[in-house]
């Protein structure tokens, strides 16, 4: 995800277990879906903004909201990261 600057969407406990070493902690918190949005500055991925939900499926609205909030973070990082 970071190298390709792609949004990662993981729905359900199996997807989280397959992609995250701390999957047991995530499950213990009652979280079953995730969207990781890369934060790009100058075409370089500087980090991610991660959204987790208790629902196993991610609605299109939540996916869109995660993408928009990623843009907000990128704008803030552009001001503060050198």
Image (tube, rainbow, N blue to C red):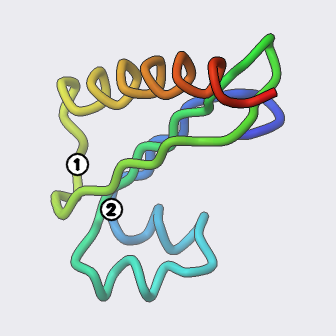
Percent x, y of residue 64: 29, 21
The residue drawn where x is 36% and y is 18% is 68
Q: Label 2 neighbourhood size at 10 Å, few (<14), some (14-19), many (20+)? A: some
Indicate the position of residue 49 as horizontal and vertical percent values. Answer: 50, 42
Q: Quadrant of residue 8?
A: top right
- Badge 2 element: loop
Q: Is residue 41 left or right of residue 69?
A: right
Residue drawn 27% across and 25% down? 65
* Place of residue 19 in the rendered image (x, y in percent of width and height, measured from the top left): 60, 64
Q: Which of the marked residues, 1 or 2, is nearer the chain's N terminus?
A: 2
Dot 1 alpha-carbon crowd within 10 angstroms: few under 14, some 14 to 19, many 20 or more:
some
Up/down of 65 relative to 26, above or below: above
Quadrant position of the C terminus in the picture: top right
Residue occupying the point 42% across, 43% down: 35
Name the residue beneath numbered marker 1: 57
The residue pinned by badge 2 equals 12
Spatial distance from mark 1 to mark 2, Cα to Cα? 7 Å
- Residue positioned most to the top: 42
Dot 1: what SS? loop
The reply to whether the C-beta atoms of the residues labelled 1 and 2 are less than 8 Å apart is: yes
On screen, residue 55 versus residue 1, left or right, reads left
Residue at 51% in and 74% down: 17
Residue 46: name its quadrant.
top right
């Amino acid at each position: 995800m970071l190298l390709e600057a792609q949004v990662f969407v993981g729905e359900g406990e199996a997807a989280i277990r397959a992609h995250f070493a701390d999957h047991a902690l995530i499950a213990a918190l009652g979280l079953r879906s995730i969207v990781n949005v890369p934060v790009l500055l100058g075409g370089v991925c500087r980090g991610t903004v991660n959204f987790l939900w208790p629902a196993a499926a991610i609605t299109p609205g939540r996916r869109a909201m995660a993408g928009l909030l990623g843009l907000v973070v990128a704008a803030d990082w552009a001001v503060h990261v050198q």
